Structures are given as structure tokens and as C-alpha cells.
Image (cartoon, helix red, strand yellow):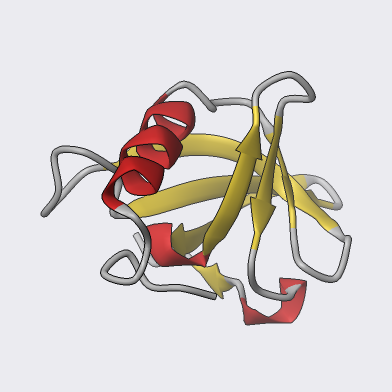
Amino acid sequence: MKSDQERDRQDVLALGARLANAEGFRVIAMDGRDVGAVENVVYKRHADHPDEILIRRKVLLWDRLYVVTFDEVAQVDPGRERVFLGIASGAIRRHSD
């Protein structure tokens, strides 16, 4: 997976724009597993793309929040309302409040 320094600038802008409108999209890990839905996109250091994506996942009766970085997002498919990650489901970190 390429870091945002290795990604073409136009690719970063396009992916950032698609992520900005991706709340509620299903998130699919590289191993094909559905890991939840986009809860929020978080902007801290960059204005053109989010730094992190929060994922809400139902586990039994509880909702849990997980986080991935922009670099871990491989693709956004607005037509199918899917965000595809470039990492396996086991590599996704639990969000600490």
C-alpha cells in the first residue's frame, strides 16, 4: 500500500473527496471481511483529506468504534457505498476515547 507521499496528488484529492461523503458506507477489509460502517471522518493535519476514519461496528449488543488512517484506505466506491481498506481486519485498531 502506498503512503500519501507516494500517491499521486490528484489521487489523494479524489480519495479525500470521496471519503468526505462516505458516512454510513460499509467498510471492507483487505481480507474481504465487513468490519462496520463509516461513523466519521477526522481532519487534524490535512485539509485535503481526512487523517483518520472512525468505523462503528456492532458487537453483540454493543457498538464499538475502530480507527484507520487515511493511508490504510485503498479505495472508495460511492456507487456501492463501500470503503475498501488496504489492511486485513485483524490490523484495525480499537478507538480510544
Going by the picture, which residue comes out furthest to the bottom?
91
Q: In the displayed structure, does residue 83 sit left or right of residue 79?
A: left
| Residue 39 picture location, percent across and down | 52, 35
Q: How many marks?
A: 0
Q: Quadrant of the C terminus?
A: bottom left
| Residue 3 picture location, percent across and down | 37, 72
Q: Which residue is drawn at the image coordinates 64% and 67% (left, top)?
A: 86
Q: Which residue is drawn at the image coordinates 26% and 69% (left, top)?
A: 5
| Residue 65 picture location, percent across and down | 55, 53
Q: In the displayed structure, does residue 45 sit left or right of residue 78?
A: left
Q: Which residue is drawn at the image coordinates 39% and 67% (left, top)?
A: 96
Q: Nearer the viewer, residue 35 or 87?
A: 87
Q: Find residue 56 and report its image quarter.
A: top right
Q: Is residue 58 in view? A: yes
Q: Which residue is drawn at the image coordinates 57% and 48% (left, top)?
A: 55
Q: Quadrant of the N terminus?
A: bottom right
Above or below, comparing residue 88 to residue 9 in the picture = below
Above or below, comparing residue 75 to residue 13 in the picture = below
Above or below, comparing residue 85 to residue 31 in the picture = above
Q: Nearer the viewer, residue 64 or 29?
A: 29
| Residue 31 picture location, percent across and down | 85, 71
Q: Is residue 65 in view? A: no
